[in-house]
Image (tube, rainbow, N blue to C red):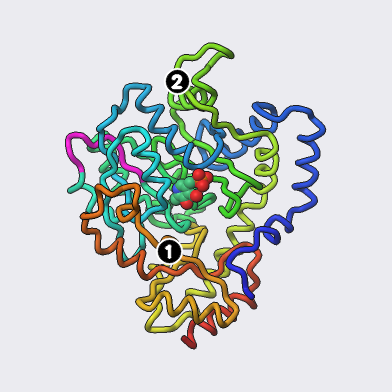
Amino acid sequence: MIPFLSLKDVNGQYADELKEAACRVIDSGWYLQGSATAAFEQHYADYIGTRHCVGVANGLDALTLIYRAYIEMGVMKPGDEVIVPANTFIASILAITENGLTPVLVEPDEETLEIDDRLIEAAITPRTRSLMVVHLYGRCAYTEHIGCLCRQYGLKLVEDNAQAHGCWFERGERREERGETKEERGERLRTGSLGDAAGHSFYPGKNLGALGDGGAVTTDDTALADCLRALANYGSEQKYVCRYRGRNSRLDELQAALLDVRLRHLDDDNRHRQQVAAHYYDHIENPLVRLPRRMDDAQNVYHLFPVLCPERDRLQQYLHRQGIQTLIHYPVPPHRQQCYAEWHDLQLPITERIHEQELSLPMSPVLTMDEARRVVEALNAF
Ligand SMILES: Cc1ncc(COP(=O)(O)O)c(C=O)c1O
């Protein structure tokens, strides 16, 4: 069987380093709010390109606490609207409703599967305070148009970067011929540094995965980072003195030390994902199987490799019989979930079609090229 993702093998690549890091924490006798978390926060902020990184317990908390902090800071209030893609993982939406904010669901572009930036302006009302972009499947969903709209309407741009660690947004023409790289010109920015704040998940299956739960917020906004750090620590800036009604949401020393190891290898892991994806793009040829529009490699770290097929369930069963494990991301869109019964009448045909047709092919930093070839052969013979 070709597994969809073997976490044992992914972490097995770095087993010695991970074990050494874990032993260091165990031997230190210090397990929360110590030097390993501070080091990882600094390394990840440097990697993403933001002034601050605040470690938290998971990706949902990261996004929830961003909005909670904006409410505490008086930037938003319950009832305000947040524009968000209709086809996202439920956590993006939960972070909004948990704060009493109102999600406004916007359809994706069927070619990219990311929020359709042509539809955003029509969704803005006098109550809109924020836009959440979700870099779904590892693709950069930010566009210059999105940046312009946020500036024009004074919206806080929050990135859900749970699936896109290491991804870039590239602006403008290539200027390498003049000896300048985009990075030097400031035209190449990591997702997670494009807006006012970003939530990251380190769920084990993510491109940058912990060996348990973990998450982080990156931002250049010092006031937001300070407020959020307090909210994640019982609302305290100073021990036993509570400024806010906070919660306990911290990235622990063990996970931080393990993440530091994984971070060192993230770009290599992503490069392998891009090689697998290039093989899929170059060789999948089946009129029943549609691939999302191909992006420049830097702008897609292929957390997942989604394809669309009108006979998705039959395709999945067929691939299973061929020894290929696939998954569906996601079978039920947020507006059809039981917990959001008030949205059941919403008509979001593109979102619904994607959820009916999406199938994720095997994708990981340890999938061999031989396995990728077998996936393509099976798919083309469907
Ligand atoms: C797009 C997206 N947002 C948010 C989350 C929530 O992250 P976590 O599982 O760490 O809470 C996830 C991952 O699970 C995700 O894929």
| Residue at point 20%, 34% (across, down) | 127
Residue 167: horizontal and vertical position, in percent?
50, 52
Q: Nearer the viewer, residue 3 or 285?
A: 3
**Is 122 on the left-hand or right-hand side of 116?**
left
Q: Nearer the viewer, residue 168 or 128?
A: 128
Question: Mark number for residue 295?
Answer: 1
Q: Quadrant of residue 349?
A: bottom left
Residue 343: horizontal and vertical position, in percent?
25, 50
The residue that label 2 is drawn on is 245
Q: Is residue 116 above or below residue 61?
A: below
Mark whose residue sits in front, 2 or 1: 2
Q: Is residue 219 magenta?
A: no
| Residue at point 70%, 59% (across, down) | 8
Question: Mark number for residue 94?
Answer: none
What residue span does the magenta drawing correspond to?
A: 124-132
Label 1: state its secondary structure: loop
- Near mark 1 (Cα within 10 A), the count class, few <14, some 14-19 or many ≥20, is few
Q: Quadrant of residue 364?
A: bottom right
Q: Is residue 130 magenta?
A: yes
